[in-house]
């Protein structure tokens, strides 16, 4: 019997998860499905990569995922990794600003009036900014329909002072995005909904408090590193054709899909899933779907570098005072990173882990420097601000070109248009972190939705 040939371009988490859900569906529905995964690099996993230094492990890229439904937590359980699931270090809930080289604890990005009100007792916030914040419950709701930037929303409801003195820096450090361009609808829908439903963030908080509504976020990781999730997926997909170092040059449709590889090899497929950056998908579809290609090219990405460090705990002064969290520079202060994540200690307490993040968009000149120059700048900062004079046991730089999607104003509208246009092409789908959520759980969830909704074409072509 001829098989339906599905080619997935991209061997990161999105591509592997899509293949997993499709394989499971094929088994359940007795579908004659052949799956080929083409990965351009020499490894699977994309930004999920665990560094191993002796008995120590730390993530080179993404390091945790939220425990939302139909996401990474459920996938881990399906893959038999439930015993390895552990709670991630609480750095996602603690934020510090750096002023004059010294850290100060702050709340994170405010998602309610109560979150913002916590800054009222902060001496670093000007009196005028505090006074304007207190007027928030009396600010009328926005009349215009549609998306707006987070910066516009915060200035409108809480004032320009609070935006300039707090939110702008936090967004640049934590999200590595420009708050003036960041989509409220895509990344902070609860803020938008609160204003529309209750008229103000203050009203939203009071009504939720009266209803005893509580929200909590649980972040998880794997005991032996997130590489374990990738390895488990690859094992589970042993019945598929998994190919590394197989970059694709072009995808063309002619009574089926023709996938041309850089090696001059050509594959024929009944369906194609582009599980990759929208900008890369745009290039592959430039001939087959020029209008769709142009729409995909609208979605912007930023390149990211990480500097990962491991220290002996005894080499770090006042280490007991340095709790896990994000460190972000305030205002126009110049530091050699967009944010610094203090990841805490090893299980035995003998080692400390840190990771610095650099955005090419936010820090183009520093980003362009060599890996050795980046290491040197980070070590100088840690010496001056934290008194760490000793050399780290381990320091390594990793770069991720066009890895972080920039969810700009109007993002979801653009995605809806892309999805509509994709539907015009038989057997074509796109997925990845550039569309409806860029977290690990978001990518897994989107892969599951794609696999369940895909309509298989009539059996036709084989490679």
Image: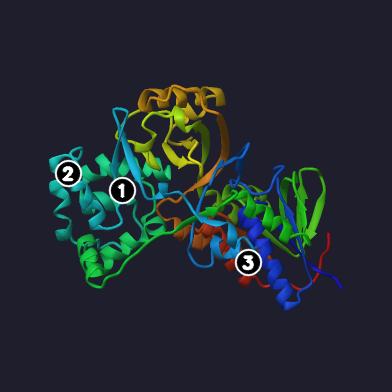
**Residue 12 visible to the viewer:** yes
Using the image, tell me which numbered label, if any, was put on residue 129: 2
- Helix, strand or loop for disc 3: helix
Is 158 rendered above or below residue 393?
A: below
Residue at 29 percent of width and 52 percent of height: 110
Is 1 rendered above or below residue 409?
A: below
- Helix, strand or loop for disc 2: helix
Q: Give the crowd class for mark 3: few <14, some 14-19, many >=20 residues within 10 Å.
A: few
Is 371 rendered above or below residue 56?
A: above
First in sequence: mark 1 vs mark 3: 3
Residue at 28 percent of width and 61 percent of height: 144
Specify the quadrant of the image occupied by residue 410: bottom left
Which residue in the protein does label 1 denote? 151
Q: Give the crowd class for mark 1: few <14, some 14-19, many >=20 residues within 10 Å.
A: many
Residue at 26 percent of width and 54 percent of height: 115
Residue at 45 percent of width and 55 percent of height: 411
Q: Nearer the viewer, residue 44 or 273?
A: 44
Using the image, tell me which numbered label, if any, was put on residue 141: none
**Which residue of the protein is positioned furthest toward the front in this rendering?**
348
* Circle 1 or circle 3, nearest the eye: 3
**Residue 424 visible to the viewer:** no
Q: Give the crowd class for mark 2: few <14, some 14-19, many >=20 residues within 10 Å.
A: some
| Left or right of residue 326, residue 49 in this image | right
Horizontal and vertical percent position of residue 215: 35, 64
First in sequence: mark 3 vs mark 2: 3
* Circle 1 or circle 2, nearest the eye: 2
Which residue in the protein does label 3 denote? 78
- Helix, strand or loop for disc 1: helix
The span from disc 3 to disc 2 (Cα, nearest Å) is 50 Å
């Amino acid at each position: 019997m001829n098989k339906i040939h599905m080619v997935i371009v991209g061997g990161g988490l999105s591509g592997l998860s899509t293949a997993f859900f499709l394989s499971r569906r094929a088994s359940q529905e007795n579908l004659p499905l052949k799956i080929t995964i083409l990965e351009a690099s020499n490894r699977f996993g994309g930004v999920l990569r665990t560094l191993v230094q002796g008995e120590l492990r730390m993530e080179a890229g993404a390091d945790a995922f939220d425990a939302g439904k139909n996401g990474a937590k459920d996938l881990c359980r399906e893959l038999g990794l439930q015993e390895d699931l552990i709670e991630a270090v609480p750095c996602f809930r603690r934020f510090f600003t750096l002023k004059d080289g010294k850290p100060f604890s702050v709340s994170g990005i405010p998602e309610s009036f109560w979150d913002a009100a916590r800054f009222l007792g902060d001496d670093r916030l000007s009196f005028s900014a505090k006074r304007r914040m207190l007027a928030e419950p009396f600010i009328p709701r926005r009349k215009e329909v549609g998306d707006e930037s987070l910066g516009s929303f915060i200035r409108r409801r809480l004032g320009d002072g609070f935006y300039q003195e707090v939110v702008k820096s936090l967004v640049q450090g934590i999200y590595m995005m420009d708050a003036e361009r960041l989509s409220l609808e895509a990344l902070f829908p609860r803020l938008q909904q609160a204003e529309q439903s209750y008229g103000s963030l203050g009203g939203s908080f009071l009504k939720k408090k009266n209803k005893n509504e509580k929200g909590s976020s649980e972040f998880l990781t794997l005991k032996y590193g997130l590489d374990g999730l990738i390895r488990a997926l690859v094992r589970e997909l042993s019945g598929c054709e998994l190919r590394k170092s197989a970059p694709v040059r072009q995808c063309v449709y002619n009574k089926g899909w023709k996938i041309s590889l850089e090696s001059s090899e050509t594959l024929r497929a009944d369906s194609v899933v582009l599980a990759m950056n929208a900008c890369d998908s745009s290039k592959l579809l430039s001939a087959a779907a020029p209008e769709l290609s142009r729409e995909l090219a609208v979605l912007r990405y930023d390149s990211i570098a990480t500097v990962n460090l491991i220290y002996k705990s005894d080499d770090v002064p006042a280490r007991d005072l340095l709790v896990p969290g994000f460190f972000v520079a305030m205002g126009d202060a110049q530091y050699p990173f967009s944010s610094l994540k203090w990841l805490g200690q090893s299980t035995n307490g003998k080692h400390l882990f840190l990771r610095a993040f650099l955005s090419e968009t936010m820090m183009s000149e520093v980003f362009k420097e060599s890996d050795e120059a980046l290491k040197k700048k980070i070590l100088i900062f840690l010496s001056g601000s934290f008194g760490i004079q000793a050399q780290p046991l381990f320091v390594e730089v990793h770069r991720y070109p066009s890895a972080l999607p920039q969810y700009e104003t109007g993002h979801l509208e653009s995605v809806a248009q892309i999805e509509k246009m994709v539907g015009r092409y038989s057997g074509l789908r796109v997925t990845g972190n550039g569309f409806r959520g860029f977290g690990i759980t978001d990518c897994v969830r989107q892969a599951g939705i794609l696999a369940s909704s895909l309509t298989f074409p009539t059996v036709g072509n084989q490679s």
